[in-house]
Amino acid sequence: MMTVRRDNLRLAGLSVLSAAFLAGCLHIATGFTATAGPEVVVDDAALAGEINELNDEIREKQAAVDQLQDRIETYKTQIAKKQAEAATLGDQVGLLENRVAKTELDIQSNEARISLVNGQIRVLDAETNAYEAQLERQKLLMAEIIRTMDASDGDLLLEAIFSSRSLADLFDQIQYLENVNDELSQALELAKATRDRLIATRTDTEGKRAKLGELQASLIESRRRLDEERAAKESLLGESLASEAQYRTLLANLREEEAFISQQVALLQGEIEAKLSVNDEVGDASVMSWPVNAGYKGISTLFHDPTYPFRHLFEHSGLDIPQPQGTPVEAAAPGYVAWTRVGSMYGNYVMVIHRNGLATLYAHLSKVSVKADQFVTRGQPIGLSGGMPGTKGAGLSTGPHLHFEVRKNGIPVNPMPFMVSPP
């Protein structure tokens, strides 16, 4: 630490110099634009030791994350291969098992990454505490020097010059003043560098905390996906009775059902729209209400969702909205019920046709409360949600939810642009 003798500092009592350094200290406190300066290191031995230990721990955690990522990449390759082969029940089950294994690794990876980021935040917090303490010590040192200089009398400089016994003595006094000025400049630069490092550390900490939130959300999603993939395997085995012949029959039924829906909607659209044109109760169907509370657990599977467990067999044609078994399901817009039906994939489902070539489908219902050719208003109950595997009307389902579709001229389209507001 720099030391300055009080009797010599009296010779440096220049008010202009004091003001300049006081302004510099204020600049440090306000944290203006960062400037390049000397390297800043933690000068507290205990804190430095703690930070080094935390950094060693972080390196170990990073190595674990890297190993998990390598295993995840291996499963990605296996899944891609299985998708190309999944023509039999055994292939499909193998694919789902690989998905489950990969998702389990995703969960382990997310947990390891969360631990890693928590460690990084602990390091940054320790560094922040160290830099704050250092900056305070540096500011106190400069404040003491400036107070000493301001307490000096500037006239003493003239006295020193005229009382010098020789020219060499005078030069020594002037050189000393220059040295004091240089030392104060260095102290100010170090304080500025510490300030800049503190700002950078705080910014880095904010970024790590945001990353932590993302990882925690990803962990929740991975756990949900794991439950869904395990249920998908059990549902498929249950629907096909673990038989290759039954599996092929199931696939044929699913494709036949999809073809039936598209054809029937196209056939009935004109007839039902003619009825709607003379019905005074019909409103605008281009903006749809949510059939259930989508804010309960959000949307688990989107339209054409790449994470859909059965995507390599058929695209996901709507939105899956998790709901407790038996939740009331409401019509998204006014229209006529085209039919109610029990299908292999959809289980119990209701098709409602609206104006402008639009239709909506509500699937995996545990109970249907409407019948064909019945007019329904927006928000009118049409049944109860279901989807619990093994229960009545569940169909090919991985858990309690409503499968909701919007169709345009019989073809499934993304429902989101039609919904009145985000879930």
Image (cartoon, grey):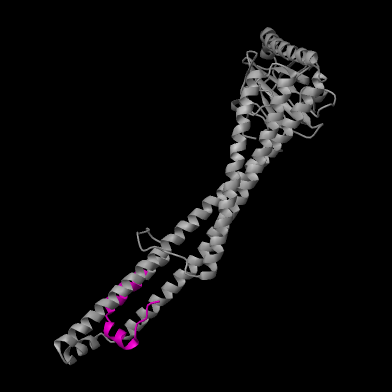
Residue 387 in the figure: left or right of residue 131: right
Q: Is residue 3 within the magenta segment? A: yes
Residue 80: image location, x then y, percent = 61, 25
Q: Which residue is pictured at 62% across the width and 37% down the height?
A: 71
The mark tally for this picture is 0
| x and y percentages locating residue 266 in the rendered image | 66, 9
Residue 240 visible, this angle = yes
- Give the left or right position of residue 103, taking residue 369 as reference: left
**Residue occupying the far left of the picture:** 167
Find residue 339 and report its image quarter: top right
Instruction: In this rendered view, identify the residue nearer to me: 420 or 18.
Output: 18
**Rendering quarter of residue 278:** top right
Residue 252 location (% of width, % of height) = 74, 11
Confirm whether residue 290 shows in the render: no
Residue 402 drawn at (x, y percent): 74, 28
- Name the residue rendered at 65%, 46% in the picture: 111
The residue drawn where x is 75% and y is 13% is 248
Does residue 103 belong to the magenta stretch?
Answer: no
Task: Please identify the quadrant where the N terminus is shown.
Answer: bottom left
Q: Quadrant of the C terminus?
A: top right
Q: Is residue 399 left or right of residue 148?
A: right
Q: Nearer the viewer, residue 362 or 240?
A: 240
Does the magenta stretch mainly form a helix, a strand or a loop?
Answer: helix
In the rendered structure, which segment of residues is drawn in magenta?
Answer: 1-24
Relative to residue 388, is residue 273 drawn left or right?
left
